[in-house]
Amino acid sequence: MKLIKQITDLNKAINKENELGFVPTMGGLHKGHEYLIKESKKKCKKTLVSIFVNPTQFNNKDDYNNYPRDLKKDLKILKGLKVDFVYLPTIRQIYKEKKLPKIILKKSQRILCAKFRKGHFEGVLNVLNRFVKLISPKIMFMGEKDYQQYILVKDFIKQIYKTSVYPCKTIRDTNGVALSSRNVLLKKVDLKNSGLIANKLIKLKRSLYTQDRSNSIGLKKSKILIQKTKSSLIEKFNVKIEYLECRNLIDLSTDLYNKPFKLFVSYYLNDIRLIDNF
Ligand code: AMP
């Protein structure tokens, strides 16, 4: 496993690699990240994992400062997985290039998390644009846990690069909660509750799928079911829900007439923000 910190070393290490899989992370690695890495190893000749807590995607300074960091543990995991390259850039190196175009989301993209985390996805697209420009991977691997991020990144990258973006399923804890680096910040009771909430939402998704979505009556019934679940979650777990809504699976629009969809949620348990989709 080669540890790379400088752009010059990065260029030297990968300039002959034309089947490189890229897994961007912010560290705090868990089984979700491991799954992405395993997929990359299956589909590409070599795999590069980056660890970079990207300041421009945090809309809250405390969230950035408190983001879980454990490089020693991360490197141990990556070594165990026999990753070929680990890229650990500094903020200065990544943001050295000043000439890249400014990223602005379209109005139709300012939904779900984009509505509640101002500037977040602009920061994500900005940093991934820089990474893909530097690395030119064949495939970039992203988790469906952050489905809105996956869709935005896929659409953005395909306009500029040959790199394809490959979605990987969400890996969950045994209690149902989606693994996330931020889960270590949860109190034990909140971790338990987030599992119970995930299971309730899995059930809700199942009942939404049984509704007839070929007419407005079925769609209205779905909205009522969502509203009922929302009220019961607030009452039972004292959560603050930012959104709980269905969106078209392909383009995240609100067109649900006979279309495949996903149920998206964002909520706070105490002060910790969790997102998931089903
Ligand atoms: P992060 O380190 O949180 O920025 O995540 C890096 C990548 O891992 C992103 O593409 C995430 O969507 C993905 N990821 C995070 N958690 C999970 C999970 N539980 N299952 C699958 N992928 C995940």
Image (cartoon, helix red, strand yellow):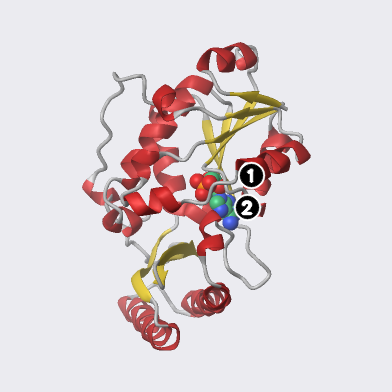
Kindly report the distance in space between the C-alpha atoms of the residues bearing marks 1 and 2. 7 Å
Task: Residue at 60% x, 12% y: name it.
Answer: 15
Q: Is mark 1 within 8 Å of ligand 1?
A: yes
> Does 146 sit left or right of 218 as displayed?
right
Q: Position of residue 170 (x, y in %)?
A: 59, 57
Q: Image quarter for residue 19?
A: top right
Q: Nearer the viewer, residue 209 or 40?
A: 40
Q: Position of residue 18 (x, y in %)?
A: 63, 18
Q: Image quarter for residue 265?
A: bottom left
Q: Nearer the viewer, residue 138 or 97?
A: 97
Relative height, residue 223 to residue 169 (above, below)? below
User: Badges 1 and 2: C-beta atoms under 8 Å apart?
Assistant: yes
Label 1: element kind: helix
Q: Amino acid at mark 2?
A: Gly
Task: Residue at 61% x, 71% y: name it.
Answer: 176
Label 2: element kind: helix
**Count of labels in the image:** 2
Relative height, residue 237 to residue 60 (above, below)? below
Q: Position of residue 267 (x, y in %)?
A: 39, 69
Task: Residue at 40% x, 25% y: name it.
Answer: 92
Q: Amino acid at mark 1?
A: Leu
The residue at which mark 1 appears reads as 36
Q: Nearer the viewer, residue 157 or 24?
A: 24
Q: Quadrant of the N terminus?
A: top right
Task: Residue at 29% x, 18% y: name it.
Answer: 99
Q: Is mark 2 within 8 Å of ligand 1?
A: yes
Q: Residues within 10 Å of mark 1 (few under 14, many from 20)?
A: many
Q: For residue 32, which numbered disc appears in the image?
A: 2
| Residue 246 appears in view | yes
Q: Residues within 10 Å of mark 2 (few under 14, many from 20)?
A: many
